[in-house]
Image: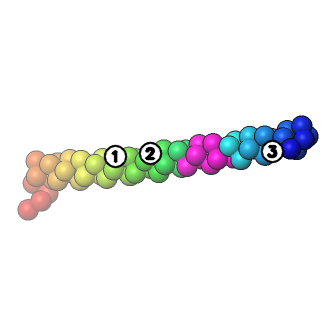
Amino acid sequence: MSNAQNANFQAGQAKGQAEEKGSQLMDQASNAAQSAKESMQQAGQQLQAKAQDATEAVKNATGMNK
């Protein structure tokens, strides 16, 4: 293999490795975004449940639940 062929081969390998690393980073970012989305949805559901409990407590305290 000539020096030029060897350099091209190594450049191709480096490009492939860089593309794989980029793909891995994109997967990690996607997973982090999905996890954040799920966490926010769970927090929203908890907040909604607490608001409903508070509403019921106010209704009970004021006699509006009868």
Amino acid bearing label 2:
Ala
Residues at marks 2 and 1, CA–CA distance in whole angstroms: 10 Å
**Is there CB contact under 8 Å for labels 3 and 2?**
no
Amino acid bearing label 3:
Phe
> Please, what is the dominant secondary structure of the magenta stretch?
helix
Q: Is residue 22 visible?
A: no
Assign a secondary structure to mark 2: helix
In this rendering, would 21 be left or right of 63? right
Residue under the point 31% across and 53% down? 45
Labelled disc at residue 36 = 2
Q: Does residue 63 belong to the magenta stretch? A: no
**How far from the left and from the top, in percent, is residue 47?**
30, 47
In the rendered image, which residue does mark 1 sit on?
A: 43
Residue under the point 55% across and 44% down? 29
For label 3, the crowd category at 10 Å Cα-Cα, with few meaning under 14, some 14 to 19 and many 20 or more, is few
**How far from the left and from the top, in percent, is residue 5?**
88, 44
Residues at marks 3 and 2, CA–CA distance in whole angstroms: 41 Å
Amino acid bearing label 1:
Ala
Viewer-nearest of labels 2 and 1? 2
Quarter of the picture holding the C terminus: bottom left
For label 2, the crowd category at 10 Å Cα-Cα, with few meaning under 14, some 14 to 19 and many 20 or more, is few
For label 1, the crowd category at 10 Å Cα-Cα, with few meaning under 14, some 14 to 19 and many 20 or more, is few
Towards the viewer: 52 or 25: 25
In the rendered image, which residue does mark 3 sit on?
A: 9
Specify which label sits upstream in the sequence, 3 or 1. Answer: 3
Q: Which residues are magenta?
A: 19-27
Assign a secondary structure to mark 1: helix
Of all residues shown, which one is farthest toward the front? 1
Q: Quadrant of residue 18?
A: top right
In this rendering, would 20 be left or right of 61? right
